[in-house]
Image (cartoon, rainbow, N blue to C red):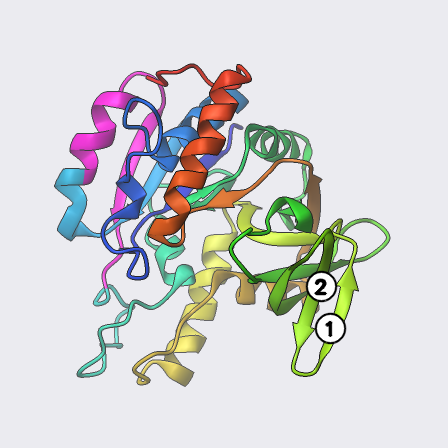
Amino acid sequence: MKPTLLILAAGMGSRYGGLKQMDELGPHGESIIDYSVYDAIQSGFDKVVFVIRESFADVFKERFEPRLKGKIKTEYVYQDLNDLPEGFSVPEGREKPWGTGHAILMAKDVINEPFAIINADDFYGRGAYKQVFDFVANSKDDNEYAMVGYALHNTLSEHGTVSRGVCETDSNDNLVNIVERTKIGYEGEKIFFYEEESKTELTGQEAVSMNFWAFKANYFERLEASFLDFLKEKGQEMKSEFYFNAVVDQLIKKDIVSTKVIRTDAKWFGVTYKEDKPLVQEKLDQLIKDGIYPEKLW
């Protein structure tokens, strides 16, 4: 069974200003999403589901439908603050979305097969899609999930420190824990993790999570059950967020699932700030020169 690609594209990009999911970065107006879907198609995926907001649905579909028609099946689902299970309501004054776990739940009625999730504004590299496709093809256990582990040095910024989830694994490369390191950066050629008055040198080979995961369809039931618990506990708060990876962490620690860390040499890059745009355009131009992509994708 071929996996589906689920793209989380409901965020408006407040730090970036505007709909960065559709920002034109390639030579013919391609966005990072275009390259992600292209890589997924090349790797064997045959369906893509976009989690978006209804407020920009028309503009989004007008952009992507003509490009993707006939190349891959498409579905669109909407993340809405008011889309809650029966018996729950949004507390008065809350405007903040419920988080990535809620976004993924929006797709439960359109995905019945194994699926991978990615962020809309991150470039993950062709090799990583192929590795995820191969994992799904070979994994026969419904309680085995996976996470792509990027080598830390392939995810750093030249513009300052970054926050990364550093993975701890067992001898079988199964995820044991993710430790959030909030300040990692270069000093010359060396990489350090900074905390208060101290700094620790890192090798750069550490596997880090960049939110590229693979799940079996049963993850939706587990996510839904956890969301109910979350709403009972934190549903009346103004800024509480329900994170899908926190649910995976609970499932691992209860020995319900295992999560394989798929180590990849693929290079990740993302667009967080407008200042990142020229660098991303430069990297895409180089990939085109290297023959990884045609100059015009579609």
Q: Quadrant of the C terminus?
A: top left
- Tell which residue pokes out farthest to the front in this image: 188
Q: Secondary structure at mark 2?
A: strand
Mark 2 — residue? Answer: 192
Examine the rendered structure and indicate whether residue 235 appears above or below residue 39: below
**Horizontal side of residue 232 vs 14, given as left or right:** right
In this rendering, the answer to whether 293 lies above or below 17 is above
Using the image as rendered, state which of residue 191 and residue 28 is in the foreground: 191
- In the rendered image, is residue 108 in sight? no
Mark 2 or mark 1, which has the lower sequence index?
2
From the viewer's perspective, tell me whether residue 209 is left or right of residue 65: right
Residue at figure coordinates x 56%, y 32% from the top left: 129
Q: State yes or no: discs 2 and 1 in contact (Cβ < 8 Å).
A: yes
Q: Any mark on residue 241, and which?
A: none
Q: In terms of image quadrants, where is residue 295?
A: top left
Q: Which residue is mark 1?
A: 199
Question: Marks 2 and 1, how far apart in space?
Answer: 6 Å
**For residue 77: magenta?**
yes
Instruction: Sort mark 1 into few (<14), some (14-19) or many (20+) by Cα contacts within 10 Å.
Output: few
Instruction: Write the residue at 48% across / 38% down.
Output: 113
Image side of residue 168 versus residue 65, left or right: right
Q: Nearer the viewer, residue 49 or 222?
A: 49
Q: Which residues are magenta?
A: 60-80
Identify the element where label 1 is drawn: strand
Q: Quadrant of residue 61?
A: top left
